[in-house]
Each structure stands twice: as structure tokens, then as C-alpha cells.
Image: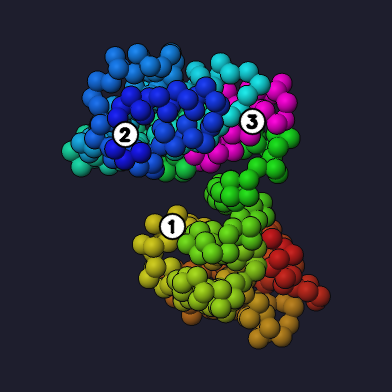
Amino acid sequence: MAAVSLNSYLSKVSQTWNAGEGDMLAALLSFRDSHIANSRLQISDPEAQVERVLDPPLDEMVAAHLRACWAWSNSDMVEAYKCQGIVVSSFAKLLGAQRDENWLLPVMYVVCLDLRLFALQADKQKRSAGRGKPGETLEKASEGIMACFRVCAADARAGEDVTKRWGMLNLVNQLFKIYFKVNKLHLCKPLIRAVESSALKDRFSKSQLVTYRYYVGRKYMFDNNFKEAEEYLRYAFEKCDRDSKVNKRLILIYLIPVKMLLGQMPKESLLKKYDLSEFCGVMAAVKEGHLYNLNTVLEDHEKIFIKWGIFLILEKLKIITYRNLFKKVTLLMKTHQISIDAFTTALKMMKVEDIDNDETACILANLIYEGRIKGYISHQHNKLVVSKQNAFPPLAASS
């Protein structure tokens, strides 16, 4: 395709369209295909030539693609994004007009992917020129992808083999990537509902399901629904391709903190295999109930944990660290009635500043409320009274 003429290219588009060859047409409209580097197809005003060969609305879509090739060749990502926006909106009309057919889904995947990628590059170009707000183009791109999603989701009457609903998950994953990037996670909720209520929800391709579960798992994590987060992220990790070490590591960045909050500590061999040594110090400090060490390691790796978006999640591990520290104090005291003073002293040894018995009692009350300690506080005697049996239930049982 590297040196074909415009007429040859348009003839090929026409042939694939008439033959209903989705994969072939997708390649002819994709920015991962070699034709985009062909100078004969990089045209600033291709409309008249395209209209002579192709009928509406296909002509509008192909003309916008050729102009996008021209903009891309000039490194004008803002213009390339605008052209790709026309490609996607024209495509949405085309897709909606087709009844009981889904052969165009491969085309939808590539044009929507290119729209998102151009939006990312356009935002970057705008920022370097001192224009626009961060992520504004990317957020706008979601509207075009959503238009295609609505067409797919509404195709409920078509037979299973020809329904456009098979395209839903690919677009949901594209939209997740946008919403996570622009920090609009609340917009994920209706998409999750649409997928979960679909009869096809467990029958999409494995790669799409892995991506979907990864993002939904992260969403659950940010909503503090840790059991659901663990279930979705674990599925993503287990089903992710064995050779995709980068992707497996990405999943673990969120799965490990979730498992820790549920009382399941990762093996050091796993952290070593996926180059996640940052978690080693966190894990050791939590296990030992060493609050000072936990604060130190969180401070040392603060930048990377914030970059990964898990710093505040890791801060929640403090409550488990308190539980493990107080368990040590209880074992040392060898009684089921322990003075609040003993716990306050332990916290002072961990360099917790300005701690007093009232604050310590609050921490203990939280641990009792969360089921991490079996017992009650006797305010009259200023003591914690713990159960004589299983005073500190296993973490997995109390979470």
C-alpha cells in the first residue's frame, strides 16, 4: 500500500465496502497501516476526488481520514484529531443505518482507538503551546466514542451472530481509559451497569475482559469496595497473558494493596519477579505492626505511590498496622484487661506525635467496630478488655 495512487486506494475502499470485508476496510482506515505514510494519500482537500468514487456517508468518512493523514504528516495533531472526529461521527451514522449486520465492528475499533490517541497527542500539543485545559480534547473525544457505544447497546433485537452488542466492551474499555485519565470515574458507573446486565458479559474476548476487569477492579478500589476490587483484579491478573509481564505488573500495582487491606500479604518472590520492591518495606512494616517504619517507607516512596494513584489506599494500611502493634502489646501484657496507657506508650515508641489516651481509645474503638479486635473499652477503669478467645481475629475474617 506504500505507493498506490489515490484512485487505487479509493477503489480498494469501495471493493471492501461492497464485499462487507470489515478487517480489510479497518486496515484502510487505520493509522497503524502503512498507507498513512504514502504522500499521495496525504491530501489537505480530498473531498471532490473522493466524492467521484464513493457514495455518502462513506465519502465523508474517507475524505476526513485522508485529511487526517495530511495533518498527521505535518505533525498537526490538533487538526488530525478534528478530522478523526469527523471520521467517527460519520461512522456512527453508517453503523446506525445498518440493520442485522455487524461486519463493521473492526472498523469501529480502529477509528475509535485512533480518535482517543489523537486526542491525547492534541492535548499534549496544546499544552506545549500554552493553550487549553489538561485533558479537554480527550474528554471531548469520549462523546464520539459514546455515540458508537449507544448504537451498539441499542441493537437488542438482532440475532446473536449479527448483533452490534459484541462491540460494546471494546468501546467501554476505550471510555474507561479516558475517564481514568481525566479523573471522571463517576462516568464509569452506567457503562459497568450496561456490561453487567448484558447476556454477553462473560463471552467477550479474553483480552477485552481482562482490560474491563482491570479498570472495574480499580474503580471498586477507589470506592473502598475491596472484596469486589480483589475479585476483579485477581481475574485480570490470572487471565492476563503469561508473557505480558508489563500488563501483569500494572495489575499487581493495584491488586497488592487491595490484598494487603484484606489481610493477604504478597510473597517476596512475587514482588521480586515483577520488580515491585517498593512494596517490600510496606509489607514488612504492616506485618510487624511497626507504625514508624510504615510512615517512613510511605514517605520514601511517596512520589511513585502518588503517581500510581495508590498512596491514599496504602495509608489505610495504618489501621491494620495498629491492630498488629496492639496485638503484640496484648501478648506482652499476658492479660485480657490492658491499660490504655500501655497502648499509648507503644504508639509513643513508634514516634506518633501528640498522642494521648483519648486518641488511643479512639483508635481502639475503630478497631473494635471494624471487627479487628474482639472486646470493649472500660472507660471507668481506662482499660481495653479483650475476649479470652481469639481476641484478634485473622485479618481475612474481619475484612
- Choose top left, top right, bottom left or bottom right for residue 319: bottom right
Closer mark to the observer between disc 2 and disc 3: 2
Whether 162 is among the magenta residues is yes
Alpha-carbon neighbours of circle 3 within 10 Å: few (<14), some, or many (≥20)? many
Question: Which of 114 and 231 lies nearest the eye of the viewer?
Answer: 114
Name the amino acid, label 2. Answer: Val
Closer mark to the observer between disc 1 and disc 3: 3
Disc 1 + disc 3, Cβ < 8 Å: no
Residue at the image position 43 percent from the left and 57 percent from the top: 308
| Left or right of residue 131, residue 196 in this image | right
Q: Which residues are magenta?
A: 150-176
Q: Which residue is mark 2?
A: 4
Disc 1 element: helix
Whether 133 is among the magenta residues is no
Alpha-carbon neighbours of circle 1 within 10 Å: few (<14), some, or many (≥20)? few
Disc 3 element: helix
Instruction: Tell me which numbered mark, 2 or 3, is placed earlier along the sequence.
Output: 2
| Left or right of residue 327, residue 358 in this image | left
Question: Which of 65 and 261 lies nearest the eye of the viewer?
Answer: 65
Instruction: Tell me which numbered mark, 1 or 3, is placed earlier along the sequence.
Output: 3
- CA separation in Å, label 2 and label 3: 36 Å
Residue at the image position 59 percent from the left and 72 percent from the top: 266
The relative height of residue 286 versus residue 175 in the rendered view (above or below) is below
Name the amino acid, label 1. Answer: Trp
Q: Which residue is mark 3?
A: 165
Residue 120 visible (yes or no): no
Disc 2 element: loop
Name the amino acid, label 3. Answer: Arg
Q: Which residue is mark 1?
A: 308
Alpha-carbon neighbours of circle 2 within 10 Å: few (<14), some, or many (≥20)? few
Question: Which of 362 and 194 lies nearest the eye of the viewer?
Answer: 194
